[in-house]
Image: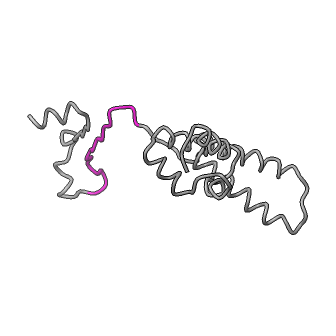
Amino acid sequence: MKKSKELYAKILEELELGNTLASICRSKNMPGLSTVHEWMKKDNKFKDQILDARRLGAMTWLDWMMDLLTKECEPQQVQWNRERLHHARWMASKLVSVFGDKQTVVNEGDPIIKVVWKEEETVDHPSTEHKTDEYAHTIRTSEHDKKKSIQ
């Protein structure tokens, strides 16, 4: 099947509606899944558009799940609905950064580790006799110190 802007637009629209790429490619008048994957390998812009469309599709799934939560259901359907809701939540946490459960810790200061030996007042040990504050060491891991130690 020959690629075209209309075909690209139809694939992206279906992904945004929450359909899977596999189900889209099984439809009549659509390219096969391996064909779409080849297009994505050759066209980074199309690959980015696919990823954005999948993110919007995840948001669509969340909308469906919110609708599902507001509806009454048969007792036999409770477990199935719970699984669907769990999967939608998981998918959103992976595809939509707003719902992600990943945390990032950033250290914005100059990290300093200070190691100090102090004398013990209650027990006299030969190993602690000579350890005073003059033996305190400071370790800095900054670019300035690394350059200085290299020279």
Residue 92: percent from the left, percent from the top?
Answer: 64, 48
Q: Residue at the spot x=89%, y=52% of the render?
A: 71
Q: Nearer the viewer, residue 86 or 95?
A: 95
Q: Nearer the viewer, residue 34 or 1?
A: 1
Q: How is the image coloured?
A: one colour
Q: Residue at the spot x=27%, y=44% of the render?
A: 116
Name the outermost residue toward the bottom.
Answer: 76
Count of number-bearing discs: 0
Look at the image and say whether residue 121 sits in the magenta stretch: yes
Q: Residue at the spot x=32%, y=32% of the render?
A: 110
Asked if residue 97 is positioned above or below residue 120 in the image, the reply reads above
Q: Nearer the viewer, residue 135 or 97?
A: 97
- Quadrant housing the C terminus: top left
Side of 133 relative to 4 (left or right): left
Quadrant for residue 124, please give it.
Answer: bottom left
Side of 89 relative to 106 (left or right): right
Residue 122: percent from the left, percent from the top?
Answer: 31, 54
Side of 10 relative to 144 (left or right): right
Q: Main secondary structure of the magenta part?
A: loop
Look at the image and say whether residue 77 sits in the magenta stretch: no
Name the outermost residue toward the front.
Answer: 2
Residue 115: percent from the left, percent from the top?
Answer: 27, 44
Q: Residue at the spot x=55%, y=51% of the render?
A: 1
Side of 120 relative to 73 (left or right): left
Q: Which residues are magenta?
A: 107-123
